[in-house]
Image: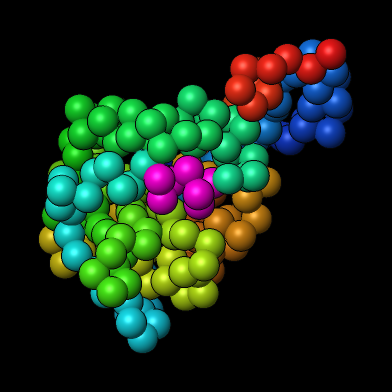
Amino acid sequence: MLPRSLVGPHQPDHLPLLGRLLAPFGVIYRWRAAMALALEGLTEPPSFPDGYSVIAWDPVWLDCLGEIDRRSYAGTIDAALYSRYFCSAAGSRRLWDEALRGRFGRFDAERTLLLLRDGEPRGHLMASIRSPREGFIGDLAVLPEDRGGTGRALLLECLWRYRRAGFQWVTLAVTLENHRAVHLYESLGFKIRYKFPVMALHRPPHGRRSA
């Protein structure tokens, strides 16, 4: 069972009205959800497709991870909401640098994972430690051509590592319009703690402004 501190009210979603009002001004408005999983209920083991393996964090691959993020988020609502990070490899590298400095909590090198195929990174999971009992997942990305069970296995591998280390729960945040991610998390037992709105100014490619 989740502790009371991790349970919050579900906020009403005013996106249909407010989103339409803000869109003409180039403002993107969406709802995100904070989710939590009590690790005591974890039962499914990770199962990686043939040809894939996982290793713990290795900074030698840091420059590759930015490109994986850029390609993984291309064309998604998260790339629009967080264009500072996900619209370029350099921006995604900036996110990793911030995570390493503690933006999401103490960076967790033991449970930050790299997905490999033929010895090359094809995806990753960014993990941090919020407290001695709470782990946090700040980013989960798999290249489009490598999807199909790999993201689920990568997430499960991380969750089991947290459980074996004595953590009680894992938290994360997700954009509710990202239905694929929401379905993945809910299928593993994550529950919504609360919802919160996010706004961003739409930035056309190469700095062009809409007429």
Q: Is residue 3 visible?
A: no
Left or right: 105, with 21 as reference point: left
Q: Residue at x 16, y 46 (%)?
A: 59
Q: Is residue 72 magenta?
A: yes
If the image is split into quadrants, where does the N terminus sit? Answer: bottom left
Magenta stretch bounds: 67-73
Q: Residue at x 18, y 53 (%)?
A: 57
Which sits in the foreground, 141 or 178? 141
How far from the left and from the top, in percent, is residue 101? Answer: 20, 27
Q: Residue at x 25, y 58 (%)?
A: 113
How far from the left and from the top, in percent, is residue 106? Answer: 18, 36
If the image is split into quadrants, where does the C terminus sit? Answer: top right
Which colour assignment does the render follow? rainbow
Q: Is residue 6 magenta?
A: no
Which sits in the foreground, 173 or 52? 52
Q: Is residue 3 above or below residue 98?
A: below
Left or right: 83, with 178 as reference point: left
How far from the left and from the top, in percent, is residue 115? Answer: 31, 65
| Dominant secondary-structure state across the stretch colored magenta | helix
